Image (tube, rainbow, N blue to C red):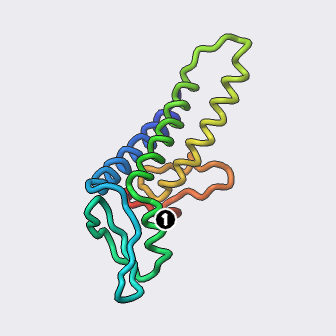
Amino acid sequence: MNAMTDALVQFLRDRLNEDEKAARQAADLGQWALGEASDDERNWVYQGEYGSMVIECQRRADAIHIVRHDPARVLAEIQAHHTNVDEYEIALWAKTEPQDAACWEARRATLEEVCLRLATVYADHPECREEWRPMGAACGHGAANSPSA
């Protein structure tokens, strides 16, 4: 690996770990679900067996969006991203036979593109680097909305 690759892998691992910590803290009471107030048009998101309210939303679309991105789903997405980063690191370090070199290079290049695109999710983080911007993707401070900035 080179310095840019090392930094990218570490940057992604750090951001994913931050996201995982936040999702685990929000998952204390269980899966999130949509609820409706019987007396008006409000909707709310609640969680857990006893229906502890998480947030009240004026717009149903907002409540549906929040429920669809509950901590369990976020944790599953984080695990998938961790797997991509792990596979990229394996491809970088793989010792290959000469006849397999082209295959491994293609795998490495594909996984690098995946990791670079994943980094754009954190484009507004102060540690995000411009050289991680894949062709055609936005990167730079303020390009995304990340609470970890």
Tell me if 143 is positioned left or right of 70 in this view. Answer: right
Place of residue 18 in the rendered image (x, y in percent of width and height, measured from the top left)? 35, 49
Q: Residue beneath label 1, please? A: 142
* Residue nearest the viewer, comparing 42 with 84: 42
Place of residue 59 in the rendered image (x, y in percent of width and height, measured from the top left)? 46, 81
Q: Is residue 6 above or below residue 35?
A: above
User: Which residue extends farthest top?
Assistant: 97
* Residue nearest the viewer, comparing 41 with 23: 41
* Residue nearest the viewer, comparing 143 with 65: 65
Residue name at image x 61 percent, y 36 percent: 111
Badge 1 crowding class, 10 Å Cα cut-off, few under 14, some 14 to 19, many 20 or more, is some
Place of residue 118 in the rendered image (x, y in percent of width and height, measured from the top left)? 54, 48
Q: Which quarter of the figure is the C terminus placed in?
A: bottom left
Q: Quadrant of residue 98?
A: top right
Residue name at image x 55 percent, y 32 percent: 88
Please name the amino acid that badge 1 sits on. Answer: Gly
- Element class at badge 1: loop
Place of residue 137 in the rendered image (x, y in percent of width and height, measured from the top left)? 63, 55
